[in-house]
């Protein structure tokens, strides 16, 4: 059985979700979020975050001043 969960996002994040859904060929925004949740549950996001922290400490990262710097 599936349940519906509604989330509220500011417009800039909605645009990013839409772009990511199209770019990575997800069937829907829901599938995009299901993918993120599966990755989180598998610990991949935590591992990636730790790797990013290590890179930051080693001086191998770029400081982002706004969301626009991500894309």
Image (tube, rainbow, N blue to C red):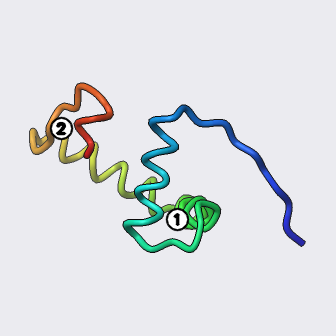
Residue sitting at 82 percent across and 56 percent down? 4
Say which quarter of the image contains residue 44. bottom left
Give neighbour class at mark 1: few <14, some 14-19, many 20+ (Cα, 10 Å). Answer: few
Distance CA(mark 1)–CA(mark 2) = 24 Å
Give neighbour class at mark 2: few <14, some 14-19, many 20+ (Cα, 10 Å). Answer: few
Which residue occupies the extreme top position in the image?
A: 65
On screen, residue 58 versus residue 6, left or right, reads left
Which residue occupies the extreme right position in the image?
A: 1
Residue sitting at 59 percent across and 36 percent down? 9
| x and y percentages locating residue 40 in the rendered image | 55, 58
The answer to the question of whether label 1 and label 2 lie on touching residues, with beta carbons closer than 8 A, is no
Please, what secondary structure does the residue beneath circle 2 have?
helix
Residue sitting at 45 percent across and 53 percent down? 46
| x and y percentages locating residue 26 in the rendered image | 51, 71
Say which quarter of the image contains residue 1. bottom right
**11 versus 26 height, above or below:** above
| x and y percentages locating residue 66 in the rendered image | 28, 28
User: Which tag is nearer the camera, tag 1 or tag 2?
Assistant: 1
Say which quarter of the image contains residue 61. top left
Per the rendering, the mark at residue 57 is: 2
Q: Which residue is mark 1?
A: 39
Q: Earlier in the sequence, mark 1 or mark 2?
A: 1
Front residue of this view, candidates 60 and 35: 35
**37 versus 62 height, above or below:** below
């Amino acid at each position: 059985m599936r349940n519906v969960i509604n989330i509220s996002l500011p417009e800039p994040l909605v645009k990013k979700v839409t772009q990511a859904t199209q770019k990575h060929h997800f069937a829907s925004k829901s599938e995009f979020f299901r993918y993120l949740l599966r990755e989180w549950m598998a610990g991949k996001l935590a591992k990636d975050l730790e790797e990013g922290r290590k890179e930051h400490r080693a001086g191998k990262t770029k400081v982002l001043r706004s969301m626009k710097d991500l894309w």
